[in-house]
Every structure is written in structure tokens, then in C-alpha cells.
Amino acid sequence: GENVEQHPSTLSVQEGDSAVIKCTYSDSASNYFPWYKQELGKRPQLIIDIRSNVGEKKDQRIAVTLNKTAKHFSLHITETQPEDSAVYFCAASPWAPKLSFGAGTTVTVRA
Amino acid sequence: NAGVTQTPKFQVLKTGQSMTLQCAQDMNHEYMSWYRQDPGMGLRLIHYSVGAGITDQGEVPNGYNVSRSTTEDFPLRLLSAAPSQTSVYFCASSDSYGYTFGSGTRLTVV
């Protein structure tokens, strides 16, 4: 099955700086790569996703890049704000029902 | 439009007891899944369904059963609760790739 590794496990950044989280996956059949944000005690919320026919996608301060050859994808958050503090999960899927998640990155934005 | 609704929100079970976690969606999604979330381990797939009457095992299915008699409902049954099943359980639904999660059930087995 799919194995997704996520780094780093914790990330502390100064407000206004950028944050980068990286993930690798093992199954070359995976073609869908979402990112979720989870605040303490809440459900995971989809923040951005990318499919394998696209190399990069951007939505305001958030961007995701995908390198299918190397089997890795990354989340970039620019101009970080205190409300960006949360746990972020990457995931990969060769087929919609079978989403495999990374272990998560706890992001803390220091004011 | 409530999205994905899970009940109960909290539950304490004694070892050996059985119970059913309820999940319902009102978005007419084909796909539904159950995940468990443990500290430091992300979310792990327990069971999933691609339509009414069709279910399959995920990464960690042991100790759990599911059924899908309707498009809307996808209950998760714990057959004989064990302390290792203490976790937060999330149900999710999807029409293609965009997953919507329920608010979760925090289960403690003592």
C-alpha cells in the first residue's frame, strides 16, 4: 500500500516568514495529493490539493508543488500569520476512497 | 445541508463492550471512509465504501466491522472493545477526490 512520509514533525516560524512542509510517497499510481489543516480538537479541513497532471498550484498565501519523478510534494505558506498555527497533514491517493496520510506537522507561528 | 454528521461525540467503553459509531452524509457522495487518529500517527484508514452494499478493508481493519445499506449511512461497529482502540474516529465522504470529514468521535476504552 501507499506510504507517506512527512517532514518536519514540528515547525516554528516568525510571523511573516514562510513555512515549508515536505512529503514523499511510495506508490507511483498515486495521482491525488491533498493537504489538510487541523486545529486543536477540530476536524481536518482541506486547504489545497493537486493532481498528478499539474506541477504547481497556488491559492493566495498557500502553494503546493509536485514532483512525480521524485515522488515528493510540498506545501508552502507565505507571509505566515498566527491563525496559520495548526497541524498540517499531507496525503496521497491512487484512488479516491483510499487516502493515505502523513504523520502531520505541527506549525507554530511566533508573533 | 449538514455535511457529514457523526454521533456520539464522546464515548467511554469498558473492555469487551461493543458499540456502533454512527456516520451520515447528506451530500449524496459515493465514497465513505472511517479513519482513526492517534497522536503522532496521522489518520489511518479502517474501512471504506464505494457505494451502497460495497465495503472493503483499509490499513487497520481488525476489531471493526462496517456495512453500507444506504448511500447516506456508514456505521462503524466495535465488536469487543480493547484499550488499543482508544482513539479519535473520523468519518469522511467524497464524490471524487474532495474529502469532507465529520467532527469526530473521541472514544476511550478502559
Image (spheres, rainbow, N blue to C red):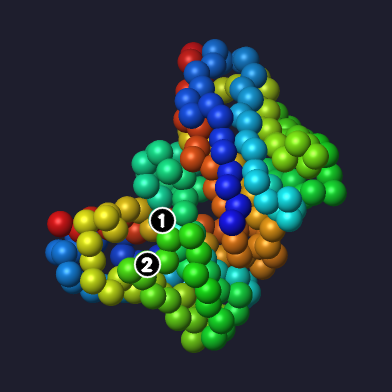
Q: x, y percentage for residue B2?
A: 51, 66
To which quarter of the image does residue B61 belong?
bottom left
Q: x, y percentage for residue B68?
A: 49, 81
Q: Do the residues marked 1 and 2 share a common chain?
A: yes
To which quarter of the image does residue A23 belong?
top right
Q: Is residue B77 left or right of residue A50?
A: left
Instruction: For marks 1 and 2, give the CA distance.
Output: 12 Å
Q: x, y percentage for residue B73?
A: 48, 77
The quadrant of the rendering that contains the N terminus of chain A is bottom right
The label number, if any, that marks residue A85 in the structure image: none
The residue nearer to you, when weighing A72 against B51, is A72
Relative to B33, is A19 above or below? above
Other residues around mark 1 within 10 Å, as few (<14) / some (14–19) / many (≥20) = many
Q: Identify the amino acid type marked 2.
A: Asn
Tell which subunit mark 2 falls on: B
- Report which residue position mark 1 lands on: B36
Is residue A32 in view from this perspective?
A: no
Tell me the SS state at disc 1: strand
Q: Identify the amino acid type marked 1.
A: Arg
- Report which residue position mark 2 lands on: B62
Q: Residue at horizontal 54%, vertical 13%?
A: A14
Q: Residue at horizontal 64%, vertical 19%?
A: A18
Label 1 or label 2, whichever lies nearer to me, is 2
Relative to B85, is B22 above or below? below
Q: Residue at horizontal 67%, vertical 67%?
A: B95
Quick one: label 1 or label 2, which is nearer the N terminus? 1
**Is there a contact, CB below 8 Å, between mark 1 and mark 2?**
no
Other residues around mark 2 within 10 Å, as few (<14) / some (14–19) / many (≥20) = few
